[in-house]
Amino acid sequence: MIVTVVPNPALDKTIVLPHFSLGRIHRAGEVIIQAGGKGFNVARALHTLGAQGLVIGPVGGYAGKHLLALAREEGLQVDMEEVAAELRTCLTVVDPAADYCLTEIYEQGAPLTRAEWDAVVRRVTSALTQAAFLVISGSFPPGVPEDALLMLLRQARAASVPVFLDTHGAQLPAALAYHPALLKVNQFEAGELLGYPLADSLQALEGAAELQRRGVREVVISLGKAGVVGCTAEGQRFGWTAPAVPALSSTGSGDCLLGGIAAGLMRGQGLIQSARLGVAAGAANTLQIGAGRLYLSDIERLLPVVKAISLGG
């Protein structure tokens, strides 16, 4: 089982609205409402790929009850901690008449108390006895302890459960000292963490190697439409191109990349082939409107089109 922590979940609402513009009354077309937050997108990819997962995080209010119902309707396994604050809502407007341009409005999320976060950590600790991997994905809400991420890493280390990280912020540099099994970030997040920009695949590979020197065992850095690069624990460098597809929305593709990697590793594949599966999953996500919505048939069709990046020169 893969346990996924979503520290700051949301009720995601996506509205398909042709010819959207500010200052007008619009009547929405298609409306998609989902259990949201990066960890839920990861969980959807895992579910699509047949991997057993469990999502843990804080949830509260009427919107929180709606999120739980939606997650269960999708067949996702959840063990959420009930908190006092109302769950945040995130709104995305998709305009198909403007090349599927996205307008995104994300609420920050209400603060959690220390006691509420401690309760989330206890749920994670209990689930680690059944976990093959622990995935921590997304931002942390206001009010959590300064070492909220490190609290999870300590529990995973005590349980000898490998951790996959896809987060950012002030806690991340200290987290590298806990030697996470995998860090998945995009090139801009990696540049922010390192303190200098990564402009291309070769610079991203050098950045991945530096992140390994700082404590991470394996690294995957996404390059958007250009694909991914990474370094295995043995120091082997690799890269995969992203297939050219008629993309509708890229929201959640990085999360599906991580879900594909985790599913591949769960199958016993090494990081290189798992990353290839992840690239196919991320590309499949772009074919649908709504984060983390993808079909296994699309992943299987796209996987052979994912080719190795030339790392020469």
Image (cartoon, helix red, strand yellow):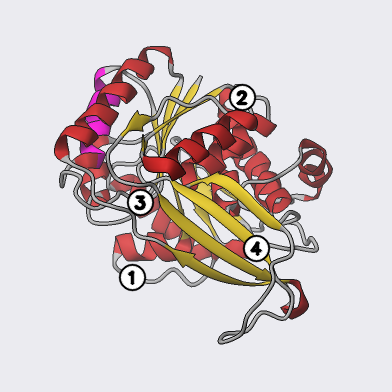
Q: Are marks 4 and 3 in contact (CB under 8 Å)?
A: no
Mark 1 is on which residue type? Tyr
Of tags 2 and 4, the one toward the viewer is 4
**Where is residue 92 drawn, in percent x and y?**
57, 64
Residues packed near mark 2 inside 10 Å, few (<14), some (14 to 19) or many (20 plus): some
**Where is residue 278 drawn, in percent x and y?**
63, 43
Of tags 3 and 2, the one toward the viewer is 3
User: Of helix, strand and loop, which one carries label 1?
Assistant: loop
Of tags 3 and 1, the one toward the viewer is 3
Mark 2 is on which residue type? Ala
Q: Is residue 67 left or right of residue 303?
A: left
Magenta stretch containing residue 150, yes or no? yes
**Mark toward the start of the polypeptide (2 vs 1):** 2
Residue named by callout 1: 196
**Mark toward the start of the polypeptide (3 vs 1):** 3
Of tags 4 and 3, the one toward the viewer is 4
User: What is the C-alpha distance between the residues marked 2 and 4?
Assistant: 29 Å
**Where is residue 51 drawn, in percent x and y?**
61, 24
User: What is the C-alpha distance between the residues marked 3 and 1?
Assistant: 22 Å
Mark 4 is on which residue type? Ile
Mark 3 is on which residue type? Ser
- The image quadrant of residue 124 is top left
At 43% across and 13% down in the image, what residue appears? Answer: 130
The magenta stretch is: 149-158
**Mark toward the start of the polypeptide (4 vs 3):** 4
Residue named by callout 3: 139
Q: Is the stretch drawn in magenta largely helix, strand or loop? A: helix
Q: Tell me the number on the disc at residue 51.
A: 2
The vertical placement of 49 against 227, above or below, is: above
At 39% across and 59% down in the image, what residue appears? Answer: 190
Residue named by callout 4: 15
Residues packed near mark 1 inside 10 Å, few (<14), some (14 to 19) or many (20 plus): few
